[in-house]
Image (tube, rainbow, N blue to C red):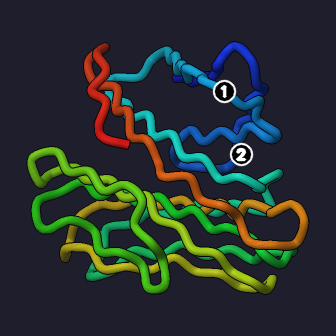
Amino acid sequence: GSVSVSDGVNTYTAIPSLNFSGFLASNITGGSLTVTSSSSGQVYADLFVLEYQGAMAVDTSATGADVASTAYSVSATTSAANTQLVCHVTKLGAGTDSGLATGFTNRIAEADGNFVSARIQDEEVGSSGSQTCTGTIPDGVQWWSDMVALKVAGGGGPTIVPPMNLPLRGGGWRPSAR
């Protein structure tokens, strides 16, 4: 299926080569905005909205999937310094939730009956080069993970605005605390 995102004001660009549908809007117009997602052919979808002030463009992205022995991992090589790594991991299978990657800060963790769980985490890195998002996962479960490196304008670190988690399930919104 296909997914699109809009708020009626800003332009959202799809981030290529991901297991999930990721979008980036640069230079967002301030004020109150309502983000709308529409899809076709989707049976299950979660909409996670995260705002990073100063993130202007995608430096690189990477994806991975496997049946884990004990860990998930996705790696990419960044070309820009002062990037914000955003890592998403979803596991499908019984057992505990996926573990937080070393050095990353948890932004969203959601579990659905301990069978499907999703985690979005991020880390600010000061230098370019090889970057990895690796964490623990229950033995023998299927997982998929994506990592996006966002270039930061002005050479400084990003200002992180607390994420807003708005999962869309079965056609209804279930907003959580911001």
Tell me if residue 163 comes above or below residue 176 in the rendering: below
For discs 2 and 1, the disc positioned in front in the rendered view: 1
User: Going by the image, does 15 lie left or right of 93?
Assistant: right
Give the image location of residue 27, x and y in percent: 82, 39
Identified at 64% across, 75% down, the residue is 124
What number is the disc on residue 79? Answer: none
Identified at 49% across, 84% down, the residue is 103
Tell me if residue 31 comes above or below residue 50 in the rendering: above
Q: Dot 1: few (<14), some (14–19), or many (≥20) neighbours within 10 Å?
A: few
Q: Dot 2: few (<14), some (14–19), or many (≥20) neighbours within 10 Å?
A: some
User: Going by the image, does 172 lie left or right of 23?
Assistant: left
Q: Secondary structure at mark 1?
A: loop
* Viewer-closest of 159 and 130: 159
Give the image location of residue 110, x and y in percent: 26, 50
- Residue 2 shows in this picture: no
- Residue 56 shows in this picture: yes
* Viewer-closest of 44 and 57: 57
Badge 1 is on which residue? Answer: 31
Give the image location of residue 137, x and y in percent: 26, 74
Label 2 and label 1: CA atoms lie apart by 28 Å
Task: Report which quarter residue 120 is drawn in.
Answer: bottom left
Badge 2 is on which residue? Answer: 16
Quarter of the image where the C terminus is located: top left
Identified at 43% across, 41% down, the residue is 164
Mark 2 residue type: Pro
Q: Secondary structure at mark 2?
A: loop
Q: Across the whole image, how many numbered discs are drawn on residues?
A: 2
Tell me if residue 79 comes above or below residue 35 in the rendering: below
Q: Are marks 2 and 1 in contact (CB under 8 Å)?
A: no
* Viewer-closest of 15 and 70: 15
> Tag 1 or tag 2, which sits nearer the N-term?
2
Mark 1 residue type: Gly
